[in-house]
Amino acid sequence: MLMILSNASLSDCFRLMPFGAGRRICGGERFAKNRFFLVVAGIMQRFHLQLSDPTLKIDPSKYKTSFLIEPPNPVYMSFTAKT
């Protein structure tokens, strides 16, 4: 499905919909999202996360958006096991 943007260009509006939409939505979407939540929750329960460079300023307005949202420069983090 294409849509016309304000600058008269065409855009594929399903580009950022990894599980589809409507009647043809992926049957595994709920499982995938629940699994992702459990993995991230498990990491957060077991580790302390810190920016490797505490002076780093993160500005979300400069992020590139495509299939994933990514910062303009790498963001390094350290994981320390909780005791």
Image (tube, helix red, strand yellow):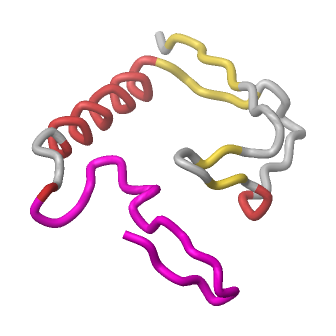
Q: Where is residue 38 in the image (x, y as percent from the top left)?
A: 27, 30
Q: Position of residue 29 (x, y in %)?
A: 20, 44
Whether residue 34 is situated above or below residue 61 in the rendered picture:
above
Q: Residue 13 magenta-drawn? A: yes
Whether residue 69 is situated above or below residue 83 in the rendered picture:
below
Q: Main secondary structure of the magenta part?
A: loop
Q: Where is residue 58 in the image (x, y as percent from the top left)?
A: 78, 50
Front residue of 39 and 79: 39
Q: Position of residue 9 (x, y in %)?
A: 64, 78
Q: Residue at coordinates 73% horizontally, 31% vertically from top-left?
A: 51
Q: Residue at coordinates 27% horizontally, 49% vertically from top-left?
A: 19
Front residue of 4 and 18: 4
Q: Is residue 64 left or right of residue 15?
A: right
In this rendering, the count of numbered labels is 0
For the magenta stretch, what is the residue range?
Answer: 1-23
Whether residue 65 is situated above or below residue 48 in the rendered picture:
below
Q: Residue at coordinates 85% horizontally, 48% vertically from top-left?
A: 57
| Residue 25 placement: quadrant | bottom left
Quadrant of the rendering where the N terminus is positioned: bottom left
Residue extending furthest right? 55
Q: Residue 20 magenta-drawn? A: yes
Q: Residue at coordinates 38% horizontally, 25% vertically from top-left?
A: 45
Q: In this view, does 32 lie to the left or right of 72?
A: left
Q: Is residue 20 left or right of residue 53?
A: left
Front residue of 81 and 56: 56
| Residue 8 placement: quadrant | bottom right
Whether residue 7 is situated above or below residue 54 in the rendered picture:
below
| Residue 11 placement: quadrant | bottom right
Q: In this view, does 21 lie to the left or right of 48?
A: left
